[in-house]
Image: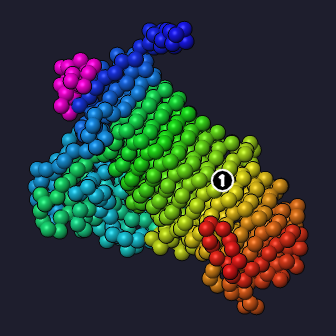
Amino acid sequence: MKGYLSILMTILIYQCIYPCEVYYISNNGNDNNDGLTPLSAWKSLDKLQIEIHKMPKNSEICFERGSIFYGSLTIENDSIFLSDYGDLANPPVITGFQTIANWEKYSQNIFKTKVEGISSLNVVLVDGEFQNLGRYPNQGYLNIMNASKNNIFDRNLNENWTGGDIVIRQTRWVLDKFSIKKQEQKTLYFENTGSYTPKKGYGYFIQNHLNTLDKNNEWYFDGLYLYMFFENNNPYHYNIQIATLNNGLTLKGNNLTINNIIIQGFNQNGIFADNTINVDVNYCDISFIGKNAINATSSSYLNISNTTSETCNNNFIEGRWNANHATIKNCVIKNIGIFEGMGANGDGSYSGIYLIGNNSEIIENKISNIGYNGITFSGSKSICSYNNIKNTCMIKTDGASIYTYYYKLDSPPKQMQIFKNTIEFSGGADALGGINGEEDFSNGIYLDGYCNDVFVSENIVSQCHIGFYTNSVRGHKIINNIFFDNRKYQAAIRQWYREALPYSFEFNLNSLVSTQKSQLILSIHNPYFSINSNFIKLEENTYSYSFEDSLNLPFRIIDKKHPLGKEMNFANWKKLIDFEQQPTFLPSLLLIDNKIQNN
């Protein structure tokens, strides 16, 4: 009894110090109500926005299941809990979508309607399906014949594109978009606010211009009118929705929780966490977003779990700089950044998860159909594990399903781990064109730049350009992985930077399996030094190549003795790399139950 009274007193004292109020909002409510019971619920997000500033810490806001709320919400309070209530099957929806009508014919197959109150538009749905901007050409890229920072020349230009957007493939891994300020004959002028300069031989296309509209459901927005192309000459045959607000939830307080809510139809972010601490997002769906599902740059202790996201034009998670102590767990992420010209400029855009911060975990997620990297992460003691990743680098290349990078030699992150991930198929951007004939470089696991001290273990990687690739041989441990059926190399180890002296690099107990003659097993590239046990430690790796003969040479080495590169068979590899301990060569292997078995 004394124990019960003690617990009761603790609860009463806590409630006195931290009062917990519960508020309700429903499509069947009334903004004149007090919002304190389901029967006296509020009706609109506008009313909630007025009242939320008055709410004490630990208040709970309950959205009725089955209700759809148009609008956005900014939370500046600390310790607010958003969730659902009711018995209906469908979770509550916070949406920025509005249905468009009042069309008038502009020209043959092109109709227009006035859209007030927005300056930019990034999401248009037709019968629930995302529609891309009109573009010229409809597929592929035009060729840059000459260029400088703020203009490109193309002698094949035959229309005036002033006022539209130019989308430039600046490098294999960057797509930048700029407004065309003017056109003088065959030269387009724009204000290049990015870090890259257009290059001769690379590609570009035009979008967001009336003259691009020539396919069904393509659209263009001039800041006042939405123009769309309809093959059947009748827009009223379709349900057309557009995003009319920028952010769904803007979070400026700390210790915030969002549970069981659908967020959709916003031009910038589904959730914008503005320099917050301790935000939890659980069992939500965040889809049809013009940029990022969740923008959490400089926000720490972000916890995203059991959340789904589909069709966001940039990233699912945008967590640049100091996004420390984040956990992204058991999320389903698909169709992110797959529309060229619709994502953000610069590095790291069009990605599934972009998270830069220490002590973070990215675990047990299912990620598929991603324009660039499936996961980009960097930060001391950060972990990427148990993820299932498929179909990445669909739009941009020189990336990977799991990618990490550090930009300078000094003070790189320490003790990063990549383990027990399953990766299948990375690539496709090269087929789109615009990269000056360069080959696809879409890898499974990619340790880039000056990163070091990364532990890579028990991953299964197949059908990528290279299964495992690093250009920094500094403290990495690559242990007990399976690299299987990758298109160029199963693994490639490269010393890119002369000043980044190699140390303590281990490549042990891995299985490397090539299934076609065009697939090589292993490449080691160090043009600055000799390749020996001081450069790399190799132990007990298993190599399989089904076409081993004198004409097929599955190993490649570049070093001071072989500056142009030398390809060789296994016998010669053993002679040259005589410091490798207990290597095994098997002429044929099968992947069975996630293990390599001798066939």
- Residue placed farthest to the front in the image? 1
Task: Tell me if residue 63 comes above or below residue 237 in the rendering.
Answer: above
Q: Considering the numbered disc 1 on the image, is that residue within a helix, a strand or a loop?
A: strand
Residue 594 located left or right of residue 430: right
Residue at 68 percent of width and 71 percent of height: 596
Please say whether residue 495 is visible from this viewpoint.
no
Asked if residue 42 lies in the magenta stretch, the reply is yes
Residue on which disc 1 sits:
418
Crowdedness of circle 1 by 10 Å Cα count: few (<14), some, many (20+)?
many
Give percent across and percent down for residue 60.
37, 24
Give percent across and percent down for residue 340.
41, 61
For the C terminus, the image quarter is bottom right
Task: Tell me if residue 372 comes above or below residue 118 in the rendering.
Answer: below
Asked if residue 554 lies in the magenta stretch, the reply is no
- Residue placed farthest to the bottom in the image? 550
Residue at 34 percent of width and 70 percent of height: 137
Q: Which span of residues is magenta-colored?
A: 27-44
| Count of numbered circles in the view | 1
Residue at 44 percent of width and 45 percent of height: 307
What colour-coding does the image apply? rainbow
- Check disc 1 and give the amino acid type: Ile
Please say whether residue 57 is visible from this viewpoint.
yes
Task: Tell me if residue 503 comes above or below residue 231 in the rendering.
Answer: above
Residue 20 picture quarter:
top left
For the stretch drawn in magenta, what is the main secondary structure? loop
Give percent across and percent down for residue 69.
25, 36
Residue at 14 percent of width and 68 percent of height: 232
Residue 476 picture quarter:
bottom right
Nearest the eye: 549 or 159: 549
Give percent across and percent down for residue 313.
40, 53
